[in-house]
């Protein structure tokens, strides 16, 4: 368990007021003459460059610290004229002049160049915060400050809370992905966290990379600055490279490290994309499947995962990453990750494994299959990790040939979001269609001997599947293949 830092206080005299100055942990900053290059392959940019940096801050994203009871991170973007990084922070009270008690907090920035021109990306870390306390903050651009945003630190001890889990948005982010995002925020009401299982964007040639991230932040809007974001990197957060010898490799896209101010407590070699945070009795562990599979960090991440799960201070353990252990679309599972990580999930009694990548919905409680899981639970067996795959955006894959027998519940050609409530002895997951209709769910009831899984009553919607002959990737969609809503099916079958 992380030790909490004592608050660091210094007092600044401004207009006769004593202002508390919160501690700052700034990241190393590249030299000003080495801007981060965010450009990708040539691609059409939106007319008029609506996603170019302006003189007021945008892309404001709040992230939890390793201990979000005492620490939060924030990042934002400005035009080049804002060469200093400054935020203001105050405890939020009902009086409208709460800002009189605000403290100035300094941070660090980097220059980045994209298809939309140069911009500065800023980061500030708020430390020494009070647990269970409401704060307001604002960040500076060249024309002044943003509006005030607010957050509440986690309690110092376990307490009930609610969070959102989203699958891939990736394509048509603002057009289609925003529907589920915004419905999730409405449905959840007051979520403490928002988790993303990777492929937030496509990082391919349908939009410039910067426009994609512009769509992603426009989709979340002010909620990104208010609800702490917990993202996992997917394969589409990486860009493909061709080495001099003709071989292929990948590197993390330039937007990820400048747009997110995540906890710096990850695995060696995957420091920017693996991390953990402890929130009110839950340890959330975020892994990077792409780096593990393609960039040689599997061993380091596996050892780090074992240690982080073994030391987890709370009753609940939730792991988030992109490539699923058990797939709902691809013909086979992800064998490398399955061999390395599944035994650790079982050893440390992980409760939920949240994933994306397959562009379908799948909930799996037993590798032996749905019927075997039901029989085992009826006989009194404790429930092991529950494996989830979900999708939030417009890109869809068809279900694989195991979907009828192995997972407990599936869907294809369907956008969803998940709302999870956590209490001392019960975790309740509800999966909703992007219309807000309940589609699936279960409760995990925890005791000293393990988890007992409780299914919902049998009054859920019919399983959502396409009908007619399957369509393989990059092949024409058969005219008589219809989706569950009577429209042409968009789910391509992976071969």
Image: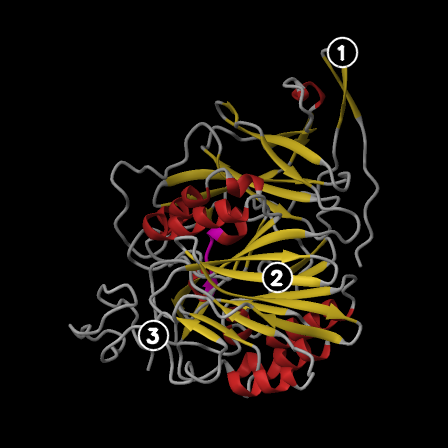
Q: Nearer the viewer, residue 80 or 133?
A: 133
Labels 2, 3: front one: 2
Q: Nearer the viewer, residue 282 or 494?
A: 282
Q: In this picture, which residue range is highlighted in magenta? A: 251-255
Residue annotated with mark 2:
428
Q: Nearer the viewer, residue 29 or 337?
A: 337
Image quadrant holding the C terminus, namely: bottom left
Between discs 3 and 1, the one toward the N terminus:
1
**Magenta includes 252?**
yes
Image quadrant holding the N terminus, namely: bottom right
**Residue found at the far top of this picture:** 15
Q: Look at the picture and state if 485 lies above or below 190.
A: below
Labels 3, 1: front one: 3
Residue annotated with mark 1:
16
- Residue 441 horizontal/vertical position (percent): 53, 65
Residue 428 placement: quadrant: bottom right
Between discs 2 and 3, the one toward the N terminus:
3
Cα separation between marks 3 and 1: 65 Å
């Amino acid at each position: 368990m992380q030790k909490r830092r004592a608050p660091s206080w210094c007092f600044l005299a401004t207009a006769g007021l004593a202002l508390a100055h919160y501690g700052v942990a700034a990241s190393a900053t590249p030299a000003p003459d080495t801007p981060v290059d965010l450009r990708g392959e040539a691609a059409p940019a939106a007319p008029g460059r609506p996603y170019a940096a302006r003189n007021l801050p945008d892309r404001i994203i709040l992230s939890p610290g390793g201990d979000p009871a005492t620490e939060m991170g924030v990042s934002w973007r400005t035009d080049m004229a804002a060469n200093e990084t400054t935020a203001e922070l105050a405890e939020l009270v009902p009086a409208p002049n709460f800002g009189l008690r605000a403290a100035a907090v300094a941070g660090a920035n980097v220059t980045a160049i994209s298809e939309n021109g140069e911009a500065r990306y800023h980061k500030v870390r708020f430390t020494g915060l009070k647990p269970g306390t409401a704060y307001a903050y604002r960040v500076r651009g060249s024309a002044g400050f943003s509006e005030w945003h607010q957050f509440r630190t986690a309690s110092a001890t376990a307490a009930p809370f609610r969070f959102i889990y989203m699958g891939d948005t990736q394509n048509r982010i603002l057009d289609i992905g925003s529907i589920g995002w915004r419905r999730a925020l409405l449905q959840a009401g007051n979520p403490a966290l928002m988790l993303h299982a990777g492929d937030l964007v496509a990082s391919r040639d349908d939009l410039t990379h910067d426009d994609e991230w512009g769509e992603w932040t426009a989709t979340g809007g002010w909620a990104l600055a208010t609800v702490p974001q917990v993202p996992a990197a997917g394969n589409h957060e990486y860009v493909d490279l061709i080495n001099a010898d003709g071989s292929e490799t990948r590197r993390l896209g330039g937007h990820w490290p400048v747009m997110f101010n995540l906890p710096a407590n990850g695995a060696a070699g995957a420091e920017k994309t693996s991390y953990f945070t402890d929130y009110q009795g839950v340890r959330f562990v975020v892994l990077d499947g792409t780096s593990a599979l393609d960039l040689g960090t599997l061993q380091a991440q596996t050892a780090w995962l074992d240690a982080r799960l073994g030391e987890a201070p709370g009753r609940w353990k939730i792991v988030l990453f992109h490539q699923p252990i058990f797939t709902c679309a691809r013909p086979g599972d992800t064998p490398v990750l399955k061999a390395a990580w599944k035994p650790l999930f079982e050893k440390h009694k992980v409760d939920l494994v949240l994933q994306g990548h397959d562009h379908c919905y799948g909930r799996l409680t037993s590798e032996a299959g749905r019927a075997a899981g039901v029989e085992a639970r009826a006989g009194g067996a404790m429930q092991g990790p529950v494996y989830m795959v979900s999708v939030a955006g417009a890109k869809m894959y068809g279900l694989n040939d195991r979907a009828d027998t192995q997972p407990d519940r599936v869907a294809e050609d369907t956008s969803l979001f998940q709302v999870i409530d956590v209490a001392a002895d019960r975790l309740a997951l509800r999966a909703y269609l992007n219309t807000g209709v309940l589609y699936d769910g279960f409760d995990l009831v925890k005791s000293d001997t393990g988890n007992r899984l409780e299914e919902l009553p049998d009054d859920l919607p019919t399983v959502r599947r396409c009908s007619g002959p399957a369509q393989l990737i990059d092949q024409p969609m058969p005219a008589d293949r219809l989706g569950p809503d009577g429209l042409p099916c968009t789910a391509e079958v992976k071969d």
